[in-house]
Image (spheres, rainbow, N blue to C red):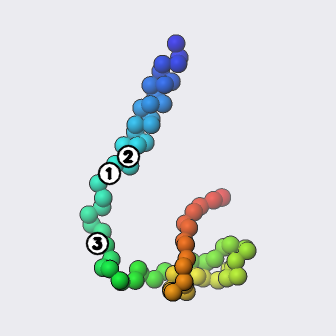
Amino acid sequence: MLRRPIITTALALLVFALASGCTSPNDNVEPLPAGELAPDFSLPDVNKNSASYGTDVSPRDFIGHGSAWYFGHST
């Protein structure tokens, strides 16, 4: 008896989760022109295994080199 309401609820939650990603893009944001650098910013390096640990790093520090930036959160 409980199986049908659970499946229905799970399906409704799945549809809601998928539909929430189908919003229109924010038209107020202007894309950067091709070839223009993104605005500069810096963040502290919190990776204890990094050579730059404890210092502020910026994408400008890596111009001409490949780099990947990951913004995550953990507690």
Q: Secondary structure at mark 2?
A: helix
Residue drawn at (49%, 25%) of the image = 7
Residue tagged 3: 30
Q: Residues within 10 Å of mark 1 (few under 14, many from 20)?
A: few
Residue type at numbered disc 2: Ser
Residue type at numbered disc 3: Glu
Number of numbered discs overlaid on the protein picture: 3
For the C terminus, the image quarter is bottom right
Is there a contact, CB below 8 Å, between mark 1 and mark 2? yes
Residue 50 or residue 29, whichever sits in front: 50
Residue drawn at (49%, 80%) of the image = 41
Q: Secondary structure at mark 3?
A: loop
Residue tagged 1: 23
Q: Earlier in the sequence, mark 2 or mark 3?
A: 2
Residue 50 or residue 41, whichever sits in front: 50
Mark 1–mark 2 Cα distance, whole angstroms, equals 6 Å
Residue 22 percent across, percent down from the top left: 34, 48
Q: Is residue 11 above or below residue 55?
A: above
- The answer to whether any part of residue 64 appears in the image is yes
Residue 16's quadrant in the figure?
top left
Q: Which mark is residue 20?
A: 2
Is there a contact, CB below 8 Å, between mark 2 and mark 3? no
Residue drawn at (29%, 72%) of the image = 30
Mark 3–mark 1 Cα distance, whole angstroms, equals 18 Å
Q: Earlier in the sequence, mark 3 or mark 1?
A: 1
Residue type at numbered disc 1: Thr
Mark 2–mark 3 Cα distance, whole angstroms, equals 23 Å
Residue drawn at (38%, 46%) of the image = 20
